[in-house]
Image (tube, helix red, strand yellow):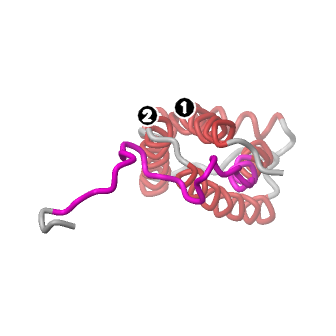
Amino acid sequence: MPISRSAFLTIVRASAVYDLALTAPFATPWTFALAHARLSALNQRLGGGALPDFGPVHVLFACLMGSIVLVWSVLRLRAASVMLGRYDGVGRGLFSAWMAWALAASGAPLLWLFLVPEFCWGVAQWLPVAQGEGSSTERAPFTSAAPMRSSRGG
């Protein structure tokens, strides 16, 4: 059963807020160092081992990922659309696959805390969306109802 467009856009925005909160600590080497220590301690409390230390190149890739997810989150907050939600759903499918791979390879219980919500946000952003009255396609934001005319008389 399709959900309303407004409900779907609420899901897109909520997933963006979730991403902002979750990935902000991954955006800089300094915040990542704090996050890494806390995540390692949490993994140990959940019955796993300490997370391995990260070298500068590992931190670089973690911060690149954190930075791009922050930018992507702001985009979805400012210009939420069905299309961006669908792309985010695909990305979450990929992230979920890599998290599942890491979970299978490491057994780190901490990964369940990331994998389950990631997968659920992805599924939610692939729910069918009800079409608006008389419309079979979504218009881009900031467009008028009038057709565009070219300078060549079109």
Task: Tell me the chief SS of the magenta region.
Answer: loop
Does the image show residue 130? Answer: yes
Identify the residue at horizontal 42%, vertical 52% (top origin).
Answer: 60
- Do labels 2 and 1 touch, CB within 8 Å? yes
For disc 1, the neighbor class at 10 Å (few under 14, some 14 to 19, many from 20) is few
Amino acid type, callout 1: Leu
The segment highlighted magenta reads 121-150
Judge from the rendering whether residue 127 lies leftward or rightward of residue 28; answer left or right.
right
Q: Is residue 64 left or right of residue 8?
A: left
Residue bearing mark 2: 30
Judging depth in this view, the residue of 18 and 129 nearest the camera is 129
Q: Residues within 10 Å of mark 2 (few under 14, many from 20)?
A: few
Residue 131 included in the magenta stretch of the image: yes
Tell me the element at label 2.
helix
Q: Helix or strand or loop: what does disc 1 sit on? A: helix
**Residue wearing tag 1:** 34
Q: Locate the C terminus by quadrant.
A: bottom left
Quadrant of the rendered image containing residue 90: bottom right
**Which residue is nearer to you in this view: 96 or 136?**
136
**Type of amino acid at the residue the image marks with label 2:** Trp
Identified at 44% across, 42% down, the residue is 75
Q: Gap between marks 2 and 1, in whole Å?
A: 7 Å
